[in-house]
């Protein structure tokens, strides 16, 4: 039994408690502020160490970064801390050490909402859409922090993912896996982010849909939005990557351009199946 | 056989009272279902929130009455209702700041909040009885009937009278307005949609820049308005007594669960199902049967299935049946 007096004692009786959609993030408290720093990549999680709550550290001096106009890809075996690294960069968990910097500012102490306002967009791996809301409402919620007219952006999203235009009045939970991922990416794009973070955007979709999604992601990157992405399909992802990170057990194992990693015999042997 | 009189008697003793009671339960159940859906726990302090809001309304009503302010044929309490709502809002926001927020920061599991809300209920209950006393309080004034039984008989020449109390009329109309406003708010406004988003997926709401603390605050404000309105309407219709509000918790929860927890439409439907069941099962059908059946067929007994003392048991039984056979409730709610 955990020593935390507020943790789960096993009661999942839905007549008195509602566990659907409950948050698991342990967001950075919002009272912090950002301060300017010099140089460095556009977005960087620098030598991050930390884990969930009082639990053990999952990340150990882990560094991930993306430069302006580039695609950076994080690959690695299961449980390597790829998703945790992304969450850490977004402020969804408290870091014990390390810094997160965005566009010349140290944002380590900012809450996730404040990071959205600073121009970061994040598509988590699972539960990345509002299933009970329509496609259009999902996009509207993506633009929640915007006070200006969002219709233009919504049109751009519909142009990028035409299928969503036809399904815009349908609850997002009724869509297929690939369409859900399109809604998820669309939602994140609605803020007009300065950087987009994708956690396994192609998880659970068919190979054809996967190619299609990769094309769309490249299309987004061409508009000048830097993309930091975790991907299971390491080979395909590294082919489109300007920069690649291989994480193993929460540490940086290999770092290089996508081509370098693809040609590195060690990386090929361990992670790309020869 | 006299079907017309049977229908009139049925309306007078069953349909109209059940409509009014059902509206009150529906408003109460909407508050419960909002907290369940958005704050994710069953709030046992809801009945006492109703009592507190109604108490403030009663006190302000008395103040207005002593100043000679009145709404003519309508009860003065309607004028005092906004003050009652503000009182309940203040109480809920202070409670949230002092109690619930602490547990949110600990990331406490909802089941802990359920028990916490029970403690809050006892404190609110004590507070209300400390301020206004445990006894029955009358605060309704204005015209008592829209149509009284005698006027109705004179108008129609029928044997049976049909009485509609002003409070019953006000209850149903207010409930319709409040429900329409609530649905418009949740489905059409940005803030309402952000509340649904938070209910659907808390982490993703955070990633979209929705401030959870703001969602929680607006939920409490809405709940205060719903609870006070329900409490005042119930008090006007019957009378205000702090303890009855704690007892109301059972039919209110039964309504919310029967309709499907977390589903606002279900809360309304559930409220009427429970109200109509309670009233029909505890009503003595002798009179209606006397009119509806051919002469001499009506039995001698009262044809009352249960004494009115057992009306709470009716909600219990419906609750059990629903939980056993249709755990998601009538509408698509959360599976229980």
Image (spheres, coloured by chain):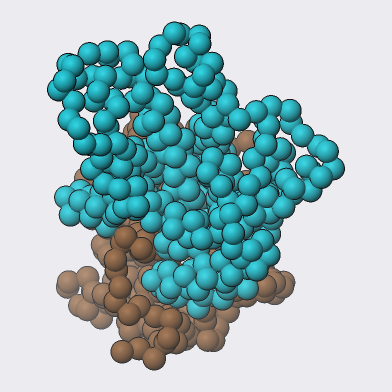
Chain colours: A brown, B cyan
Closer to us: B276 or A146: B276
Residue A219 percent location from the top left of the image: 43, 45
Image quarter for residue B170?
top right
Closer to us: B81 or B43: B81
Q: Is residue B328 above or below residue B288?
A: below
Q: In this image, B34 relative to B83: left or right?
A: left
Q: Which quarter of the image is occupied by the C terminus of chain B? A: bottom left
Residue at left offset 19%, top offset 20%: B293
Residue A14 percent location from the top left of the image: 31, 61
Q: In this image, A215 relative to B125: left or right?
A: left
Q: In this image, A170 relative to B149: left or right?
A: left
Q: Is residue B175 above or below residue B310?
A: above
Q: Is residue B64 above or below residue A167?
A: below
Residue B73 percent location from the top left of the image: 69, 27
Residue B99 percent location from the top left of the image: 58, 73
Q: In this image, B243 relative to B70: left or right?
A: left
Residue at left offset 58%, top offset 51%: B240
Q: Which quarter of the image is occupied by the N terminus of chain B? A: top left
Inspect this view and state whether residue A201 appears.
Answer: yes
Inspect this view and state whether residue A28 appears.
Answer: no
Residue at left offset 36%, top offset 64%: A17
């Amino acid at each position: 039994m955990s020593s935390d007096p507020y943790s789960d004692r096993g009661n999942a009786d839905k007549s008195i408690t509602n566990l659907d959609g409950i948050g698991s993030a342990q967001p950075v408290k919002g009272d912090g502020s950002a301060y300017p720093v010099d140089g460095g990549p556009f977005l960087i999680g620098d030598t991050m160490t930390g884990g969930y709550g009082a639990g053990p550290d999952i990340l150990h001096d882990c560094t991930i970064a993306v430069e302006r106009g580039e695609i950076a890809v994080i690959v690695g075996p299961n449980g390597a801390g790829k998703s945790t690294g992304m969450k850490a960069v977004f402020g969804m968990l408290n870091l014990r050490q390390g810094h997160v910097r965005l566009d010349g500012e140290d944002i380590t102490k900012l809450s996730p909402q404040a990071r959205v306002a600073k121009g970061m967009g994040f598509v988590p791996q699972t539960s990345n859409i509002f299933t009970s809301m329509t496609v259009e409402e999902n996009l509207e919620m993506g633009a929640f922090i915007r006070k200006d007219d969002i219709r233009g952006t919504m049109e751009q999203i519909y142009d990028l993912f035409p299928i969503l235009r036809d399904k815009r009045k349908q609850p997002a939970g009724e869509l297929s896996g690939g369409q859900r991922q399109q809604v998820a990416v669309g939602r994140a794009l609605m803020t007009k982010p300065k950087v987009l973070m994708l956690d396994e955007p192609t998880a659970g979709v068919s190979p054809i849909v996967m190619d299609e999604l990769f094309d769309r992601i490249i299309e987004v990157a061409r508009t000048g939005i830097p993309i930091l992405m975790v991907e299971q399909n390491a080979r395909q992802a590294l082919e489109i990557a300007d920069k690649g990170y291989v994480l193993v057990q929460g540490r940086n194992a290999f770092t290089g351009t996508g081509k370098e990693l693809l040609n590195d015999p060690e990386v090929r042997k361990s992670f790309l199946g020869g | 056989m006299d079907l017309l009189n049977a229908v009139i008697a049925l309306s007078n003793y069953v349909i109209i009272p059940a409509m009014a009671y059902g509206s009150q339960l529906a408003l109460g159940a909407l508050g419960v279902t909002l907290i369940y859906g958005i704050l994710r726990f069953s709030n046992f302090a809801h009945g006492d929130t109703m009592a507190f809001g109604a108490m403030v309304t009663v006190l302000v009503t008395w103040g207005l009455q002593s100043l000679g302010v009145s709404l003519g044929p309508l009860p003065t309490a309607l004028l005092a209702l906004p003050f009652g709502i503000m009182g309940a809002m203040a109480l809920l926001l202070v409670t949230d700041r002092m109690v619930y927020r602490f547990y949110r920061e600990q990331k406490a599991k909802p089941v802990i909040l359920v028990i916490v809300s029970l403690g809050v209920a006892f404190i609110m209950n004590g507070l209300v009885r400390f301020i206004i006393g445990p006894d029955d309080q009358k605060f309704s004034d204005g015209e008592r009937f829209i149509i009284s039984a005698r006027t109705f008989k004179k108008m129609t020449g029928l044997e049976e009278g049909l009485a509609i109390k002003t409070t019953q009329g006000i209850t149903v109309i207010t409930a319709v307005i409040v429900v329409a406003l609530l649905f418009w708010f949740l489905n059409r406004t940005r803030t309402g949609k952000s509340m649904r988003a938070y209910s659907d997926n808390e982490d993703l709401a955070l990633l979209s820049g929705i401030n959870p603390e703001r969602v929680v605050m607006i939920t409490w404000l809405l709940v205060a308005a719903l609870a006070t309105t329900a409490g005042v309407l119930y008090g006007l219709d019957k009378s205000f007594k702090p303890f009855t509000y704690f007892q109301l918790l059972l039919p209110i929860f039964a309504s919310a669960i029967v309709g499907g927890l977390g589903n606002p439409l279900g809360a309304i439907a559930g409220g009427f199902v429970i109200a109509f069941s309670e009233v029909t099962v505890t009503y003595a059908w002798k009179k209606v049967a006397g009119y509806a059946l051919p002469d001499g067929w009506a039995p001698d007994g009262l044809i009352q299935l249960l004494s009115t003392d057992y009306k709470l048991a009716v909600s219990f039984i419906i609750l059990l049946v629903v939980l056993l056979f249709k755990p998601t409730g009538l509408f698509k709610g959360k599976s229980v």
